[in-house]
Image (tube, helix red, strand yellow):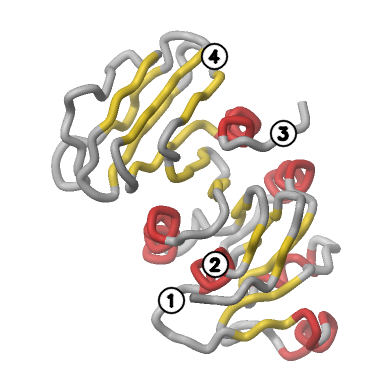
Amino acid sequence: MNAIIVQSGEPVTLIGGAPVDPLTLAECLRIAPQVVAADGAASTALVHGIMPRAVIGDMDSLPAADRARIGEDRIHRIADQETTDFDKALRSIAAPLVLAVGFTGARLDHELAAYTVLVSVAGPPCIVVGHEDICFHAPQRLTLELESGTRVSLFPMRPVTGTSTGLEWPIDGLDLAPWARVGTSNLATRAQVTVDPHGPGLLVILPRSCLSAAVRALGVSAPG
């Protein structure tokens, strides 16, 4: 288990190595102003004019010039090759919330590995923020304030059951599993949606426009 490297009372934006849209990054920074980079994504932070508070990873992709610019006091190498840089970084952060940007839209194997980390790492609550969608691991009790008709997709990364209210197709009594029944393309039918999974492993996928609602549902105040 990694030691805590970054301890923050504010939410943290964690930048990954996939392409980062400036508008997406700006939206994340409004909610999570502290910045951590996963390995070579520190170069992305610098391109956007951001000096990361810490760079965490196995340091196999950070150019020497950027490393020198950042300074060794901000570089934290975790050498093991059994975990991804996303895993290493998330385990090393203590914060109310992490917004992970730059982890979608490039290599599919890296993106799938990120979703595995969401349901397996005992770190802070984390929302992966993509260009179209956001994704997070459902807590034991989730209450979302959404507009009626909003797409609410539930994807099980392991067998899981649960209950829900405010969904067009409730999950009560269903056995969800990645190789069997999943819960994608569901819809909110009222302003408040609840999802109560009976155990870990359920991902919630919402439109990007629901980021602030998801942040509030995970117990953090979000700018209007």
CB atoms at circles 3 and 1 under 8 Å apart?
Answer: no
Using the image, tell me which numbered label, if any, was put on residue 91.
Answer: 2
Q: Is the residue marked by circle 3 packed among few (<14), some (14-19), or many (20+) residues within 10 Å?
A: few
Q: Can you identify the residue that label 1 sits on?
A: 83
Using the image, tell me which numbered label, if any, was put on residue 147.
Answer: 4
Which of marks 2 and 4 precedes in the sequence?
A: 2
Disc 4/disc 2 C-alpha distance (Å): 34 Å
Residue type for callout 4 = Glu
Disc 1/disc 4 C-alpha distance (Å): 38 Å
CB atoms at circles 2 and 3 under 8 Å apart?
Answer: no
Judged from the image, the secondary structure of the residue bearing numbered disc 4 is loop
Q: Can you identify the residue that label 3 sits on?
A: 221
Which of marks 3 and 4 precedes in the sequence?
A: 4
Disc 1/disc 2 C-alpha distance (Å): 11 Å
Q: Point out the frontmost of discs 1 and 2.
A: 2
Q: Residue at x 69, y 86 (%)?
A: 63
Q: Point out the frontmost of discs 4 and 2.
A: 2
Disc 2/disc 3 C-alpha distance (Å): 23 Å
Residue 90 appears left or right of 15: left
Residue 173 appears left or right of 148: left
Residue type for callout 1 = Thr
Residue 76 appears left or right of 71: left
Residue type for callout 2 = Arg
Residue type for callout 3 = Ser
Q: Residue at x 34, y 27 (%)?
A: 185
Q: Residue at x 77, y 82 (%)?
A: 66
Which of marks 2 and 1 precedes in the sequence?
A: 1
Disc 4/disc 3 C-alpha distance (Å): 19 Å
Which of marks 1 and 3 precedes in the sequence?
A: 1
